[in-house]
Amino acid sequence: MLVRTLAEVEDTDADIKSENWRSKRIILAKEGVGFSVHETTLYAGTESYFWYANHIEAVFITQGEGTIEDLATGEIHELAPGSLYLLNDHDKHIVRPRTEIKCVCVFNPPVTGREVHDENGVYPLVTEDA
């Protein structure tokens, strides 16, 4: 059994910060469970483009409000506490938080913690063995 708190992750190499968001990576590939779990904070008034070409991501909103735009269809969906979106088709998308959004993100395959978004918003596929 693994029990870990956000406080244990804060300000470690598993706490990734950018201008638009902060991702506390609670469970990573090294745990060997086939997925990773992160608490992500998206900052109010920002716009973040993402495309997980190598991962499936599920995102559950716990706080805040904003929108997500599906760039393939142009559809815009409201986000609020209790909303979940699943990027099951490697969907290119833009998230626009009106207020600070906190969410729980699950990635498959799991991230190692060493990934960095490239110029296309993509995480490279990095394995724990790499």
Image: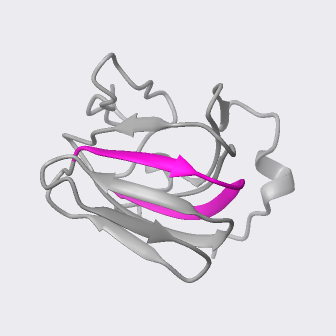
Q: Residue furthest top?
A: 119
Q: Quadrant of the C terminus?
A: top left
Left or right placement of residue 96 versus residue 119 in this view: right
How is the structure coloured here? one colour
Residue drawn 27% across the image and 39% down it: 51
Q: Is residue 43 above or below residue 6?
A: above
Front-most of 26 and 63?
63
Quarter of the figure with residue 81: bottom right
Range drawn in magenta: 92-109
Q: How many marks?
A: 0
Give the image location of residue 67, x and y in percent: 47, 59
* Residue 96 lies in the magenta-colored region: yes
Q: Is residue 80 above or below residue 107?
A: below
Give the image location of residue 23, x and y in percent: 62, 44
Residue drawn 32% across the image and 16% down it: 119
Residue 32 in view, yes or no: no
Q: Residue furthest bottom?
A: 82
Quarter of the figure with residue 49: top left
Front-most of 46 and 105?
46
Give the image location of residue 10, x and y in percent: 81, 43
Residue drawn 31% across the image and 68% down it: 86
Left or right placement of residue 130 versus residue 32 in this view: left
Residue drawn 40% across the image and 26% down it: 117
Left or right placement of residue 129 versus residue 89 in this view: right
Please name the predominant secondary structure of the magenta segment in the image.
strand
Left or right placement of residue 9 versus residue 83 in this view: right
Give the image location of residue 98, x and y in percent: 64, 54
Residue 82 in view, yes or no: yes
Front-most of 109 and 116?
116
* Residue 15 lies in the magenta-colored region: no
